[in-house]
Amino acid sequence: MFSSQQISDSLWVDVSPARNAAPALTGRAETDVAVIGGGFSGLSTALHLARAGHSVTLLEGRSVGYGGSGRNNGQVIPTMTAAEPDAIEERFGAAGERFVALVRDSASYLFDTARAEGVDCEGEQTGWFQPAHRESRMKLSQARVNAWAKRGAPARLLDRAEASRVIGSDRWFGGMYNPTGGHINPLALARGLASACEKKGVAIHEASPVEAVERRDGKWHLKTREGELVARAVMLASNAYTGFQEAGLAPKVARSVVPVLSWQMATTPLDEAQRAVVVPGREAVSDTHGDLHFFRFDKRNRLVTGGALAVGHNGPERLKALVGRRLREAFPVLGMPEFDFVWNGYIGMTEDRFPYICQLGPDFWCWAGCNGRGVGLSVSLGRELAAAIAGTPVEELALPLSDPRPIPLHGLVKTLAPPFMLPLYRWRDGRD
Ligand SMILES: Cc1cc2nc3c(=O)[nH]c(=O)nc-3n(C[C@H](O)[C@H](O)[C@H](O)COP(=O)(O)OP(=O)(O)OC[C@H]3O[C@@H](n4cnc5c(N)ncnc54)[C@H](O)[C@@H]3O)c2cc1C
């Protein structure tokens, strides 16, 4: 069974500006738009609606940034993990084309939004690099560069010598580089967006898990333990954490997504000699392994990295050995690195590796299932979903809609996915 680390174990809790918790919802309140979930998706939707003058109330079950948004690696990446632009456009037509453009611009949009709202999220727009871990994967890198360059993205292919200069290691073979990417402190971004929302009049209630959403008398009624919120429109932004706090919240959405635990770690701060060798340009790096190898610096020169485990037993100690060895092999200058922080969070996986963006009822919107790439995406989708809620016709928006498809035997799939899928990914990683 997996052991879920508390968010308080994370580097980001240690280094982010504190936030005074907003009070829980008590009694009955009315709003134009109710947002469920205080991660990037909910906060971005609330922010864009508030900018347009709507009255918005956001209900967060625990605390702002409690979900994936406060726990992630902070890599701002302008692509999806597995859904390629051609396939998205083929499946969704014009909406797919608009969505691909949204993904293309999503990294810059996140950095621009943080700047516009005066949020200090330790953002570094130093670029994102996806190096090929086998020579054969260069074909994939080339195909991706072609697909994105055709659509106006500034993506380019680096050869092996350039890759080794960017990474500071010759273990990779080249790969796709996109200068619009980079990295952030994600919890600082979530808390900063929450403050920006509050300044624009959004009412935020933390420790207010929504138990149920019901339609009565032409309005949505959101029930919490101590209160009720009545709204014209609802945005469900609980993503991979849907159903974790209250099983009755949108079970159809919860059962369409498989939450998979992803482990994150931060080394002790590197010294200047090590820092000058390892990723000297401070890009965000995540490679072509299915069992992903990824790392980036934080502001204090810690390498923030992580890995996956098939079984969670004694997870932090096993990961320190596994990921420490990987880093030592790639960067001998590090020796066997020490880790100050190990934590984890749930990523929402979907069967076809494409998110659900859906309308669950009149003026009731939702998206879920980032498949590991939702930092930039959440902020941009928040803008589009805010526009939909405000009445912009969906034909004008970057919203490729599909219905959630509950997975049969979801409970079993959730438990068995990591022990079966990770060995398969590792097996594939070792082959051309
Ligand atoms: C460990 C990890 C590493 C990752 N690394 C990266 C990365 O480097 N780059 C990248 O692009 N993506 C990454 N991701 C994915 C990214 O973090 C997510 O896609 C993104 O944060 C999703 O944001 P969200 O707002 O949609 O959901 P979340 O941030 O998960 O927010 C959902 C919120 O809903 C709340 N909630 C749940 N139930 C209720 C309820 N009943 N009532 C009220 N509130 C409720 C939760 O408490 C939570 O705060 C990573 C994810 C994880 C977990």
Image (cartoon, grey):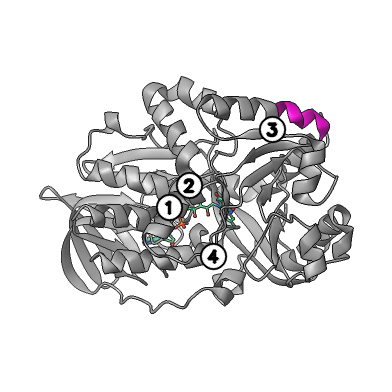
Decide which of 230, 386 is in the foreground and name it. 386
Kind of residue at disc 2: Ser
Do residues under tags 1 and 4 come within 8 Å of each other at their CB atoms? no
Provide residue 292's location: percent of width, then percent of height.
71, 47
The relative height of residue 101 versus residue 266 in the rendered view (above or below) is above
Membership of 250 in magenta stretch = no
The reply to whether the residue tagged 3 has its Cβ within 8 angstroms of ligand 1 is: no
For label 1, the SS is helix
Do residues under tags 2 and 1 come within 8 Å of each other at their CB atoms? yes
Provide residue 423's location: percent of width, then percent of height.
76, 43
User: Which stretch is magenta?
Assistant: 134-140
Q: Would you name the residue on which mark 2 appears?
A: 108
Q: Would you name the residue on which mark 1 appears?
A: 112
**Distance Cα–Cα, label 1 vs label 4:** 13 Å
Rendering quarter of residue 55: bottom left
Kind of residue at disc 3: Leu
Kind of residue at disc 4: Glu
Q: Could you tell me which residue is drawn at 53 percent across and 33 percent down? A: 153
Q: Say which mark, if any, is on residue 122.
A: 4
The relative height of residue 284 versus residue 314 in the rendered view (above or below) is above
Q: Could you tell me which residue is drawn at 25 percent across and 53 percent down? A: 49
- Quadrant the N terminus occupies: bottom right
The reply to whether the residue tagged 2 has its Cβ within 8 angstroms of ligand 1 is: no
* Magenta stretch, main secondary structure class: helix
**Distance Cα–Cα, label 2 vs label 3:** 20 Å
Q: Would you name the residue on which mark 3 appears?
A: 157
**Distance Cα–Cα, label 2 vs label 1:** 6 Å
Of labels 1 and 4, earlier in sequence is 1
Rendering quarter of residue 114: bottom left
Provide residue 362's location: percent of width, then percent of height.
21, 41
For label 4, the SS is loop
The reply to whether the residue tagged 1 has its Cβ within 8 angstroms of ligand 1 is: no
